[in-house]
Image (spheres, rainbow, N blue to C red):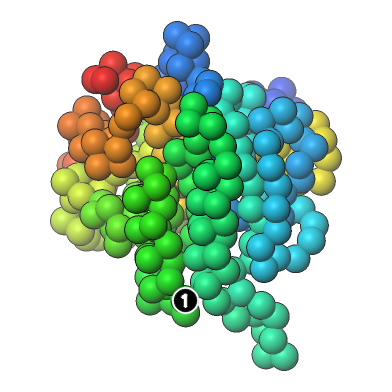
Amino acid sequence: MRGYNGKLITSKSCDEIMELGKNPGLGVRTLHEMGYTGSGVSIAIIDQGLNPDHIEYADNLMGYEYVHSFKGASMHGSAVTSIAVGTNCGVAPDADVYYISSTFGRLTPIGFRYDLSAMADSIDRICEINELLPQERKIRVISISMGFENMSGGNRVKEAIDRANEAGIFVVTTSTEVNYGFILMGLGREPFGDPDDMESYMPGSWWADNFYRSPDWYSPDRMLLVPMDSRTYGSFSTTDGYEYCSTGGLSWSVPYLAGMYALCVQVKPDITPEEFIEKAFETGIQKTIVHDGKEYTLGTIVDPVILIESF
């Protein structure tokens, strides 16, 4: 079997791909070696059901609740938690995590119908939990791998995010432009590409064609990019297995950015979302890529090491 660039895929190379996919990339592991691991910072995640016992994050899990949710674990929940706080896969491997399982809707006779009131209720529940935590262990960021613009209950979500902001909590969704004025997107990477090498990255697989057709829409002045494709994460069906996804979605970008915020909170406890966003753009990278003989500017790509050093 042959994969990208005609490279022969063997069991050994599959192991290599899986290991590369565990690396958050862009120098994040260098930050871990320097002691920036999210220690003392709390993250909340609102997503589908979680497998709470996976070794990747079980020791980080401080609380697990259901709000308008089915029981049972999902691939999605384990993946986003691994990317945010996983021991081997996570951006902030020493951060505490409070998890709320929510389905963001309900089953009806004609299928599933979204009602994002559940998302708003979950955000408010995180704020309630936060009031009970000591100052030094407050939840500082919520990761929700879903958008809410133009959806039923979306206005309630926006209002809940505003309340969370007032309580000192950054809420990262796939609709960051609504509350924070920037667009969050994700980077592509071939399976054998070095996750720490900026040159390994390209537009994410699901939006690359649109980028090459309409590059002006993807302005570096308003778009913030983090690694997304070719990621490995904890399995939802075992306590020690792993799964791999070559084509990610914004669902994988959200917990990455939330984890990055946790590292910045560790360095600068009084940081605000606005300061973080401004610094991420100031210290980020815009790189030139060539596609079909034409040059494109891809950015702004978060540079974790320079970002941390800026505080």
| Image location of residue 222, percent across then percent down | 20, 50
Q: Nearer the viewer, residue 139 or 309?
A: 139
The answer to whether residue 292 is left or right of residue 95 is left
Q: In the orientation shown, which residue stands out farthest toward the bottom?
A: 109
As drawn, 145 above or below 40? below
| Residue 33, position as x, y percentages in the image | 49, 9
Q: How far across and how far down the image is residue 301, in percent?
A: 29, 36
Badge 1 marks a residue whose secondary structure is loop
Quadrant position of residue 209: bottom left
Q: Residue at x 80, y 57 (%)?
A: 72
The residue under label 1 is which amino acid type?
Gly
207 or 306, nearer to the observer: 306
Say above or below: 196 vs 133: above
The extreme top residue here reads 34
Nearest the eye: 191 or 239: 239
The reply to whether residue 54 is visible in this rendering is yes
Q: Residue at x 76, y 42 (%)?
A: 52
Whether residue 159 sits left or right of residue 81 in the image: it is: left
The vertical placement of 121 against 58, above or below, is: below
Relative horizontal placement of residue 21, taking residue 157 as reference (left or right): right
Residue 102 lies, with reference to residue 14, above or below; the image says below
- Residue designated by label 1: 153
Residue reaching furthest to the right:
238
Q: Residue at x 60, y 81 (%)?
A: 113
Q: Is residue 21 visible?
A: no
The residue at 50%/65% (across/down) is 120
Residue 284, quarter of picture: top left
Q: Nearer the viewer, residue 301 or 86?
A: 86
Relative image position of residue 229 (x, y in whole percent): 49, 42
